[in-house]
Image (tube, rainbow, N blue to C red):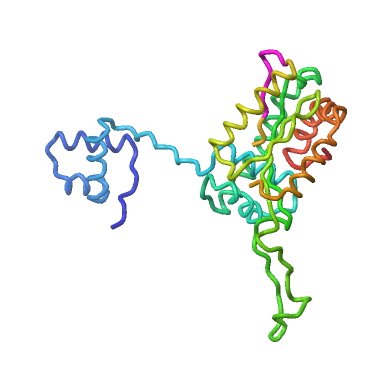
Amino acid sequence: MSRGKNITSNQRVIINVLLDQNLSQVQIAKKLKLSRCTIQNAIKHINKFGMLENAPRTPRKRTTTERIDRIIRRLSEGNRRLTARDIHNEVKAYRECSLSVRSIRRRLIENQRARVAFAREYLTWSAVDWTKVVFSDESKFNHSGPDEKKCMHRCSGEKFMPKCTIPIIKHGGGSMMVWGAFNRNGPEPLHIVEGIMDSTSYVRILENNLLPYARSQRLDRNWIFQQDNDAKHSTLEAVIKKVWAQISVQRCANLIDFMPRRCAAVIKNFGYPTKY
């Protein structure tokens, strides 16, 4: 059964007046040239909400958390060639929500607008202002590339030809999730995430790693935490930690000092990629 069409608050006022005049629903429908179903819905609305105006609509529940939104943004900015479907396959590894490729596309548009808004808000900040900010991010590293299916086009009879097959590494080759943070004085020791990164383990990481790091840097009480939005392979862990340890204090300082220019570049390019 189809729904009656939406009516205005003025029409509900008229319906209410006609009801007080003891007109039936059929008579009111003929008089206002509306369906009886529409009249019934109007009466239900008045009885349920006790008002003639349109009832406030309940906002649609968002399918992603703020953290998942940050991860989508980081993946997009880290590799501009990733499609919405590629990002969707990566986000599934976090297992915090179930969302569609269409939702990913909407988030990418939102992220572009949010980048411009962020840059405008902090455009007037100097390099000194940015020294009180601690940046953090988490990322997953795989031995054998992203967690996604790979397709191969081949003709009949070419099923086992070397050029028509894709080599694989048994058991995925190993992967791990890591979390790290830095400020102008340098990076903190890299944290290897055990198991699946969810909201509970994320809060635990902040308590056990971020707060001690902030105290060790002797930051004042007004310091700011800027969020970005399984560890089973010892070789991969060693490589990641080695690269992280090679990040110099000067590189961290340069990243912080260039924040004013980054904000200006984001605004100038309307939230699209910049040279930074």
Residue at the (75%, 33%) spot, across then down: 267
Left or right placement of residue 242 versus residue 145 in this view: right
Residue at the (73%, 15%) spot, across then down: 218
Residue at the (14%, 44%) spot, across then down: 24
Residue at the far bottom in the pictured view: 157
Left or right placement of residue 20 versus residue 5 in this view: left
**How far from the left and from the top, in percent, is residue 27?**
17, 47
Quarter of the figure with residue 126: top right
Q: What is the chief secondary structure element of the magenta stretch? A: loop
Quarter of the figure with residue 250: top right
Query: How many numbered marks appear?
Result: 0
Which span is picked out in magenta?
A: 219-226
**How far from the left and from the top, in percent, is residue 45?**
26, 38
Quarter of the figure with residue 213: top right
User: Residue 48 or 259: which is nearer the viewer?
Assistant: 259
Q: Which corner quadrant holds the N terminus? A: bottom left
